[in-house]
Image (cartoon, rainbow, N blue to C red):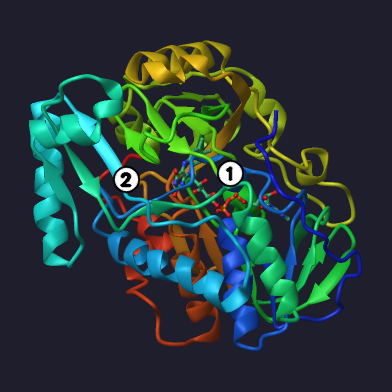
Amino acid sequence: MPAPLTSVETSSELPTHADVVVIGGGIIGTFTAYYLAKRGMKVALVEKGRIGAEQSSRNWGWCRQQNRDARELPLSTKSLDLWEQFAADSGEDTGFKRCGLLYLSDSEKELDGWAQWGEFARTVNVTTLMLTAGQAAERGRVTGKPWKGGVFSPTDGTADPSRAAPAVARAIIKLGGTVHQGCAARGLETEGGRLSAVVTEKGTIRTPLAVLAGGAWASSFCRQYGIRFPQATIRQTVMAVSKGAPEIPDALHTADISMTRRSDGGFTLAISGRGRVDPTPQLLRFAPQFLPMFQRRWRKLAPGGLQGFQAGHEGLGHWRLDQPTPMERMRILDPKADGRVVELTYKRAVELVPMLKTSSITGAWAGYVDSTPDGVPGIGEMAELPGLVLAAGFSGHGFGIGPGAGHLIADIVTDMAPLVDPRPYHPDRFQSSSWGKVAEF
Ligand SMILES: Cc1cc2nc3c(=O)[nH]c(=O)nc-3n(C[C@H](O)[C@H](O)[C@H](O)COP(=O)(O)OP(=O)(O)OC[C@H]3O[C@@H](n4cnc5c(N)ncnc54)[C@H](O)[C@@H]3O)c2cc1C
């Protein structure tokens, strides 16, 4: 089943020209188009299904600096401010609030890791509070259990995945940009080796610049142009329960279970990192690059089934511009929730917070997390096709950094001073054999 999602009214009339076309209407594509429209660019955003309907509505909504890879931390710090600024500037509500994130643990090793990260965070002025056993028990009193310790990140927060991308899409339209749902970009045209147009199922938009924010579809799109972008998707399951008690922290993480208060008062529940890897032709192609990540996470990853192959986002075929592509056959990637994981998640949640016993299950869904081999997104203009900027592979933590990433991509497109150093994100790092630290959500 799809996750809850607000709808947004968009235009069926496609422009013939644009300064920039953004392909993909998730949180990354919408924020990119928003910042471009704010700079007075004529921007058109095309989305094959519904705004926000893939990963961007299926996630937990965490917007965190806590435990971030050093390369992503500056972007996440800026993003927290930008979530607030977006609401003030646009008048749209994404549900963002700085509620703080609470992590509890009984593992010395985990606590040591958090403490080390906290030392590093202090050097870049990020506040994170290590909790003693007593403080962890106090902040986690809803569990009624003792804890060895924990960490609280007071400046982090959550936004509402059911509202965020649609809210940003409305803001783009207010600024004069156009947004088109049910409109797959089938491919690109070039002139003199540079991008010259985006060809969609509803017509061609002439443009010198395009941003590919296609989430799980980005690698197969790139392959049409000989661009090698290693990407693998992991199928993760999430569930929602009805109203919980106000004493439950807004965002709580333990090794067994994570819970997040939803804006309807219920909770989103999930087991962090748990997922299935569906075998697909693309997975086999990039398997050598992903092996270190899979090895590190093997306890939490299980082999999947045919769903991924049938969905078509990881095929190796070539698409024609005058015929429907796999993206028109699969408007919204909507994998089935893993029944066993749903049962286990609910059991663990009730064990951790017994007062959830009175809640009822209101939904369960799954999403394909689009990952890169080093867990950091690929953002940058592609040397193979000048005019095309790639922005994908957000590896399970792209929702919270959506505003910062969108701003940075708009900076790259318009050649303005970048919000943060863009170099660590450039996808050309995947062409070398020197990998950075393997990160995990
Ligand atoms: C279960 C789960 C939990 C998560 N929890 C968190 C969390 O708590 N915090 C966090 O920061 N992140 C989290 N994430 C990750 C986060 O959701 C993603 O990193 C983020 O949403 C990626 O946004 P995106 O815009 O790149 O991709 P998507 O939201 O997947 O959007 C891509 C869009 O592009 C469209 N598209 C693709 N190709 C084309 C084309 N050719 N033409 C037109 N449209 C196209 C697709 O239809 C899709 O709508 C989680 C993810 C999952 C699945």
**How many neighbours does mark 2 have within 10 angstroms: few (below 14), some (14-19), or many (20 or more)?**
many
**Rendered residue at 44%/56% (across/down):** 97
First in sequence: mark 2 vs mark 1: 1
Q: Can you name the residue that lies furthest to the front here?
A: 246
**Rendered residue at 18%/33% (across/down):** 138
* SS for callout 2: strand
Estimate the x, y position of residue 306 in percent, counting from the top left. 64, 19
For the residue with label 1, is its CB less than 8 Å from the closest atom of ligand 1?
A: yes
Estimate the x, y position of residue 71 in percent, counting from the top left. 28, 60
Image quadrant where one finds the N terminus: top right
* SS for callout 1: helix
Identify which residue, 140 or 387, lies in the foreground: 140
Estimate the x, y position of residue 137 in percent, counting from the top left. 17, 29
Viewer-nearest of discs 2 and 1: 2
Identify which residue, 108 or 319, lies in the foreground: 108
The residue labelled by disc 1 is 55
- Is 289 placed above or below 40 here? above
Q: Left or right? Give the position of 95 relative to 6.
A: left
The residue labelled by disc 2 is 101
Estimate the spatial distance between the alpha carbons at disc 2 and disc 1, rounded to whole Å.
21 Å
Which quadrant of the structure image shows residue 65? bottom left
Amino acid type, mark 2: Leu
Image quadrant where one finds the C terminus: top left
Estimate the x, y position of residue 156 in percent, counting from the top left. 33, 55
